[in-house]
Amino acid sequence: MSYLSWIFYPIYAIVTLGALLAVLMDHRQPAKTVAWVLVLVFLPVVGIVIYFFFGQNTRKERFISQRSLDQLTKRSMLEFAEQKNLKIPADQGALIKLFTNQNWSFPFKDNEVDIYTNGYDFFHMLLRDIGKAKNHVHIDSYIFNDDALGYMVADELVEKASQGVEVRVIYDDVGCWNVKNEFFERMREAGIEVHAFMPVKFPAFTGKVNYRNHRKLCVIDGKIGYIGGMNIATRYIKGRSGLAWRDTHLRIRGGAVYGIQRAFLVDWYFVDRTLITNRRYYPEVSEKLKNDCLIQIVTSSPISPWPDIMQGYVRILLQAKHYVYMETPYFLPTEPVLFAMRTAALAGVDVRLMIPYKTDAKLVEWASRSYVMQTVESGVKIYLYKAGFNHSKLLVSDDALCTVGSTNIDFRSFENNFEANAFIYDEQMACRLKDVYLQDVKESVLLEDVRDLGNQTFVQRLWESLVRLISPLL
């Protein structure tokens, strides 16, 4: 046994030292670096295992070649260049340029948008649109459950495949760990192309378990696009507590569908290595949709050079003149976002944040409380949504711009996940989403009115401070 110890301890020390050096040399945010150092030093053996699964940095890796990305972007670029009378709002020019330069996310005009805030309306329309598909249906979903609703969607897709419609489905392997493989095999046998995103198979992809495709996209015939926060699951119709999850999803017709299509086809190349660039996936926009509603479809991922959506949030907060209203189910902000929120509030901007009164993840709830109290100190108004679990991710500012998508205000969405948001530059749309927010306020209470959150014991505050140390890893 002593001989084994002499072998084990030197090897363990070398591996731990190597992991510490890798963390330090990655030049991550200091808070995240410190969190990993604490895990590696104070959790012997377990810390190494956690780092192996969740700690490796992929931002500098190239999972898709620049040449392939250029080809996939070329079609949407041509459609962007062909737009006539494109008007870029002067106040939003810098933000639009930021996304265009870093993310190849082009602004498209001529859009019509429907907003869905409950699962009944959203899935009814989704099933209806799929039923009318004549050319192709593309679905990219973090969760595609094998529950009653999942089977309804799958049955409709099987029916369309039998009619000769091309159907492609991407689901996240980790998000669908509880879904039986037979569910997806049935679709494959019906002629549907189905792929798991970055499947976690020991040992080859185990280190990628932390980097998940959290996007919720759907494109039908290149003319209709869906983007937002709803997965394919019955929880949006009836939740575990009897209340349906509250979420926000958009149905878009018009130029912005090109951006959603590009996002899907980039993911498709990622999982299938098939380069799809045919013009028929980018049909001409109907003349009936001509307007100045401008939309950018912005994606972010752990393999892009910059955290694009996070930078967009920071820019919006710092350029706001009157107000910024935000909703997120999980609030573990990165330091730049926390700084921007506090700076905007101290500058007199009406910054409001809505989070659930109770989350579906207790550890995250504990970790977020210290961040919440920090924002309150600077004048941010915190609303706690009580009518069920609010899973919505939206932001609206100054009656001028808004965004809806899959991105939470937390480390995981900004740093680790593959996300997608629609950024909309249109006064009418901003006011519509503002109304959605104000309706949610009616189902909420202010943090200052909740005594049990404001009067905590020393032990509770100590525990939340300790959990906060690992918040960058949650």
Image (cartoon, rainbow, N blue to C red):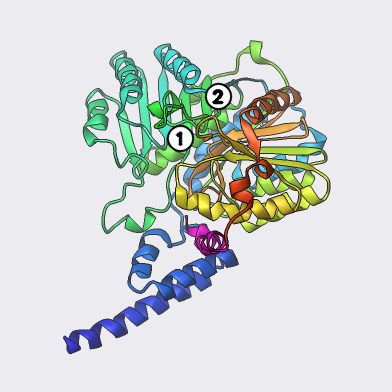
Query: Callout 1: few (<14), some (14-19), or many (20+) C-alpha neighbours within 10 Å?
Result: many
Q: Amino acid at mark 1?
A: Leu
Element marked by disc 2: loop
Is residue 423 a member of the stretch shown in magenta? Answer: no
Residue occupied by mark 1: 265
User: Percent x, y for residue 392?
Assistant: 55, 34
**Image point 50% across, 31% down: which residue?**
388
Element marked by disc 1: helix
Q: Of 221 and 347, which appears nearest the observer?
A: 347
User: Percent x, y for residue 404?
Assistant: 60, 33
Main secondary structure of the magenta stretch: helix
User: Percent x, y for residue 199?
Assistant: 32, 47
Is residue 459 a member of the stretch shown in magenta? Answer: yes
Q: Amino acid at mark 2?
A: Thr
**Image point 44% across, 39% down: which residue?**
267
The quarter of the displayed image where residue 450 is located: top right
Is residue 415 something that shows in the picture? no
Residue occupied by mark 2: 117
Query: Callout 2: few (<14), some (14-19), or many (20+) C-alpha neighbours within 10 Å?
Result: some
Per the rendering, the mark at residue 459 is none
15 relative to 187, above or below: below
- Residue 436 in the figure: left or right of residue 72: right
Is residue 334 something that shows in the picture? yes
The quarter of the displayed image where residue 43 is located: bottom left
User: Percent x, y for residue 463?
Assistant: 51, 62
Quadrant of the drawing holding the N terminus: bottom left
Magenta stretch in the rendered image: 458-474
279 relative to 352, above or below: above
Separation (CA) of disc 2 from disc 1 = 27 Å
- Residue 376 in the figure: left or right of residue 298: right
- Residue 238 in the figure: left or right of residue 434: left
